[in-house]
Image: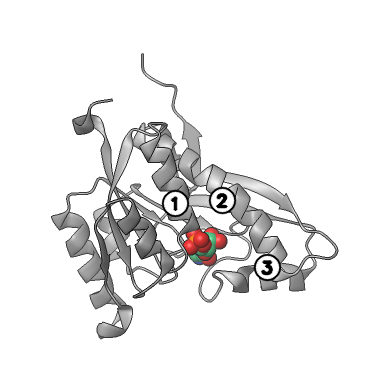
Amino acid sequence: MKKKDLKKVAVLVSGGGSNLQALLDATRSGEIPAEITLVISNKPEVYAIKRAEDSGIPAIVLDHRDFASAEEFSRAILKRLQETEVDLVCLAGFLRILAPCVPEAYPNRILNIHPALLPAFGGKGLYGMRVHQAVLASGVKYSGATVHIVTAEPDQGPIVCQEVVPVKDDDTPQSLADRVLQVEHRIYPEALRLLAEELIEVDGLRTRLKTKPN
Ligand code: GAR
């Protein structure tokens, strides 16, 4: 695939960046007609930044604590996305809620990964290890991972990919997180491929696969 045909993707992170790594590996291998051209972290000195730098991708820190409001923080992110002329955005372990101005500027072009079966165990205050703690406390026997399109409502956009993971009797939040992460690393590149190949049709909260044009 010629470079000019690749969709430009920004990845937003807040931590270790194992999902960023899965996306980097999949885009580099040519499985996805996309290239990651920018990484933005809201936290300085996280391992995700090193992963970007090791791959030669520009990484910038926009620390949410430097902004007066979530709206101002989100507008600063939006400015960078627009300056870099990205086509798509992936939230990969990005633990801040974006103000509506960002999804409104990129309708159906932002993906998020969440470590549970949305719409359960999502929304404000449910992120990272807190999700797995809530899952275990609820007693459910299955959890999973979800990739969805980002809309103005946190964790409530149309679901693109979802996969179930069993909860084991002796699970701790960490052991469940580890099992869910393995699934995340598989379904996130797949969801990005579908978006980059323009194969996702959105109908309300439902998505369907378009048939591939010849
Ligand atoms: C992942 O489990 C991701 O699903 C979760 O944070 C972890 C980040 O891991 N995201 C959320 O909870 C967002 N609501 P990573 O930094 O190794 O990709």
Mark 2, other Cα within 10 Å: few <14 / some 14–19 / many ≥20: many
Q: Position of residue 139 (x, y in %)?
A: 80, 67
- Circle 1 residue: 21
Residue 6 sits in quarter: top left
- Residue at coordinates 27% horizontally, 73% vertically from top-left? 62
The image quadrant where one finds the N terminus is: top left
Distance from mark 2 CB to nearest ligand 1 atom below 8 Å: yes
Q: Mark 3 points at which residue?
A: 174
- Check disc 1 and give the amino acid type: Gln
11 to the left or right of 143: left
Q: Residue 68 location in percent, x, y?
A: 25, 86
SS type, badge 1: helix
Amino acid type, callout 3: Gln
Colouring scheme, one of rainbow, by chain, secondary structure, one colour = one colour
Closer to the camera, 59 or 131? 59
Q: Image height check: is 16 above or below 124?
A: above
Residue beneath disc 2:
184
38 vs 184, left or right, is: left
Q: Is mark 3 within 8 Å of ligand 1?
A: no
Above or below 189: residue 199: above
From the Cβ of disc 1, is ligand 1 less than 8 Å away? yes
Question: Which mark is first along the chain, 3 or 2?
Answer: 3
Query: Which residue lies most toward the front here?
Result: 54
Foreground label between 2 and 1: 1
Label 3 crowding class (10 Å Cα cut-off): few <14, some 14-19, many 20+? Answer: few
- Report the amino acid beneath label 2: Glu
Q: Quadrant of residue 13?
A: bottom left
Labels 2 & 1 near each other (Cβ < 8 A): no
Q: Earlier in the sequence, mark 3 or mark 1?
A: 1
- Residue 21 vs residue 68: left or right? right
Residue 152 in view: no
* Label 3 residue SS: helix
